[in-house]
Image: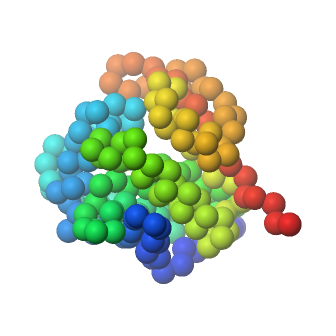
Amino acid sequence: MSTISFPAFTTITTERLVLRQITVDDANEMFALRSNPEIMKYIPREMPKTVEDAIKHIAFMEDLYQKNECMNWAICLKEDNVLIGNIGYFRMQAENHRAEIGYMLSTDFHGKGIMQEALSAVLKFGFDEIKLHSIEAVTDPENFSSWMLLEKNGFIREGHFKEDTFWQGEYLDSYVYSLLQPKQS
C-alpha cells in the first residue's frame, strides 16, 4: 500500500506572506475565522462555539498531520505573523498521489490577492515536495470567488454533483475541480 510521507513541517514564505504551522497560540484567530458565518456559508462544517472548540480542531488537524493525512498552514502577513486564514491538503489518496486542497481567509483580507499568493505557493509545494500527481478542490457552485480562483490557477472543473451533500436540512451541490502536476520539459 502506498503512503505519503510529509517532510518535516515546512514554513513557506512568499512576497507578502508566511505560511506556517498552526499552533494553539492561533486558537483565538482560528475561532474568529471558523465561527464567522460569512466565511463558513459555503463550507458545510460545524462552526466552533468556543475557543476551546478551536483548540480541539487545531489538535485534530495536528493529529492528522502526524498520520500523514493532512498538512495545514496558517496564512499570515509577514509583518505580524498573525493567522488571517488557512490553507492545506486533506483527504490524502496516497495510492493515487492525490490530495484535496482547501482554504479560507478572513473577510478583512478578501480581494487583495492574498489567497492567490498562498494557493500558488502551496500548489508548488504539493507538486515539488509532497510529489502529488493531482490536486482536487471541492467548492460550492455559489462560491464564485473560490471557483474563479481555482480556474485562474489552472484547475479544470471535472464535475457538478447535484445534491451530493446533506447539510442543515438541505441538499447542496458541489463543483469538483482538479489540477494535474505540470509536465516537466
Quarter occupied by residue 34: top left
Residue 5, given in percent of the width and then of the height, sits at: 58, 74
Task: Please state if 59 lies on the left or on the right of 150 as rendered.
Answer: left
Residue at the spot x=23%, y=39% of the render? 36
20 or 64, nearer to the observer: 20
Q: Quadrant of residue 17?
A: bottom left
Which corner quadrant of the image does residue 35 belong to?
top left
Question: For the N terminus, which image quadrant?
Answer: bottom right
What's the residue at 55%, 35% (across, down)?
148
Q: Nearer the viewer, residue 29 or 111?
A: 111
Viewer-nearest residue: 185 or 91 = 185
On the rendered structure, is 39 left or right of 135? left
Residue at left offset 20%, top offset 60%: 27
Vertical relation: 152 (above or below) 77:
above
Give the answer, above or below, for where 124 lies relative to 140.
below
Residue visible at 35% across and 19% down in the picture = 169
Visible in this render: residue 133? Answer: yes
Total numbered labels placed on residues in the image: 0
Residue sticking out furthest to the bottom: 8
Coordinates of residue 48 in the picture (x, y in percent): 21, 45
Q: How is the image coloured?
A: rainbow
Q: Can residue 61 be spotted in the picture?
A: no
Q: Residue 103 in the image: x percent, y percent?
A: 43, 49
x and y percent of residue 179 in the render? 68, 49
Image vertical order of residue 5 relative to residue 139, above or below: below
Q: Quadrant of the C terminus?
A: bottom right
* Residue 59 shown left or right of residue 3 in the figure: left
Residue closest to the far right: 185
